[in-house]
Image (cartoon, coloured by chain):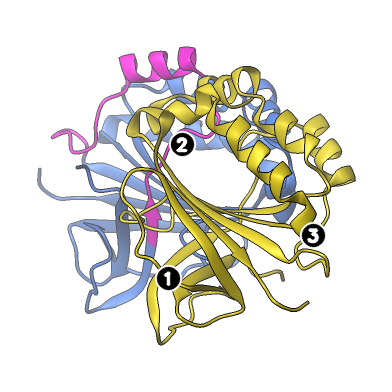
Chain colours: A blue, B yellow
Amino acid sequence: MNPRLFSFVGGSAGPWRVTRIDTIVGEPLPAVTNVTVVPDVSPTADASWTLRGITSNERYVTRDEKTDLVARQEGLGRAASMCAALIPIRKSPEWWGLPQDERRRIFEDQSTHVKTGLKFLPAIARRLHHCRDLGPDEPFDFLTWFEYAPADSAAFDDLVALLRGTPEWRYVTREIDVRLVRDEA
Amino acid sequence: MNPRLFSFVGGSAGPWRVTRIDTIVGEPLPAVTNVTVVPDVSPTADASWTLRGITSNERYVTRDEKTDLVARQEGLGRAASMCAALIPIRKSPEWWGLPQDERRRIFEDQSTHVKTGLKFLPAIARRLHHCRDLGPDEPFDFLTWFEYAPADSAAFDDLVALLRGTPEWRYVTREIDVRLVRDEA
C-alpha cells in the first residue's frame, strides 16, 4: 500500500535547502534553512515547524481531465528535478461553505486550474496533500509539493503567477511559497 | 466556532442504549451496550471502541440541492428524537479511484442519494462525519449519525433499505448499523 500521509519538516538540516520563503498572503511561517519530506508523522529533532498532509481522492477532476493528466504527468524523484517548491494554502470559510457545483465552476470553468496545470506537464511534477480533514486545528488546507529541473524555474514562476491571478485565488487567505534546491541526485 | 471533530464511544455506559447492532457487510464491530457521542477526541475509560469523524464541506451536493436540504432539515437534539442510529461505512478503493464526475453520477443520477434523503426530512435528522482523511489507518470512511422519533422508526428502515439497493452501495465494503434509544429527553 502506498503511504498517504506525509510530513514536511522545516529546520536546519535536511536534503532540501531553502532558497526563498515568500509569504504571499496571511501569517508567515518561521524561517528555516532546510526542509525534509518524510512519510507518516515522524517525531523529528530540530524542527522549527512540521506540516502534515494526506493524499486523497480527486475533488474536482473529471474522467477526461484525469486521462489527460495521467498521460502527461511524471512522478516525483526524477534525477533532473533538483528544484522543489512547497506551497501551503488555506482557503476561506466562504469557499468551504460553497456547494460542490459552485466550487467546481470557480475552480475550472472560471479559473482553468486543471487546464493551466496541464500546460506545464511533464516539466512540473506535483503531489497534492490535504490537511483540512486531518483534524479541526490544521494551519493549512492543502500542501502542494512540486519538483522540476533548474531550467524550468521560470516556467514554475509563470504557473504560480497564472494561478494567483484566478477567481479561485480570491478565496485563498493564507499562502506561503517555499523554494528549495538539493545538491545531489 | 462549531466543533467539527466527534468521537463515538462504544462501551457499557452512556446516554444512548444499543438496541441492535447489525453487520450489513464486512468485519463486525465488537458488541457494546451503550454509545456516547463526545466532541473532539476525549480519552474514555470503559471504551470497547472509539470511532472518530469530522464534519466537512459538501462533496457532491449542488446549490439547488443544498437549498432544499437546508429549508427542510432540522437539527440534532430535538426533544422527540428518542431514537438514533450510527452507521459507519467504508467504500472500496475502486470508488475512491473514480474521478469526481463519475462519483457524482453514481451518487445522485443513478442512486438519487440526496432526493431519497429529502423525502425523509424533517423526520430523520442527520450529521455526516468524514474519517478517510483523518489519517491513513481509519477503519471507516464515514460515520453518519441519525436521530428520529420512535414513530419514525419504520421510515428510517425504509430509508436505509432504499439506499442499500442503489448502485452507490455496490462500492460499500463495510457497513455496521447500530440502533440506539435514550430513556429521557
Quadrant location of the C terminus of chain B in the rendered image: bottom right
User: Callout 2: residue from which chain?
Assistant: A
The answer to whether residue A74 is left or right of residue B13 is left
- The residue drawn where x is 25% and y is 33% is A149
What residue is pinned by disc 2?
Answer: A157
Determine which residue is flagged by label 1.
Answer: B32
- Which comes before the other along the chain, label 3 or label 1? 1
Q: Please determine whether, in this image, residue B4 is positioned above or below residue B41.
A: above
Is residue A2 positioned above or below B49 on the image?
Answer: above
Which percent across, then down, holds residue B142? 50, 49
Residue at the extreme right of the image, as rendered: B71
> Residue B122's x, y, as percent?
83, 48
For label 3, the crowd category at 10 Å Cα-Cα, with few meaning under 14, some 14 to 19 and many 20 or more, is few
Using residue A105 as the reference point, say whether residue A11 is left or right of it: left
The CA distance from mark 2 to mark 1 is 57 Å
Question: On screen, B93 above or below B136?
Answer: above
Task: Give the distance between the C-alpha atoms of the residues marked 3 and 1, in whole angstroms.
Answer: 26 Å
Report the amino acid beneath label 2: Asp
**Can I make out residue B61 in this image?**
yes
Residue drawn at (89%, 44%) of the image: B71
Residue type at mark 1: give it: Val
| Residue contact between numbered discs 3 and 2, judged by CB atoms under 8 Å | no
- The chain carrying label 1 is B
Stretch of the chain drawn in magenta: A52-81
Image quadrant of residue B26? top left
The residue closer to the viewer here, B54 or A46, is B54
Residue at 60%, 18% (x, y): give it: B110
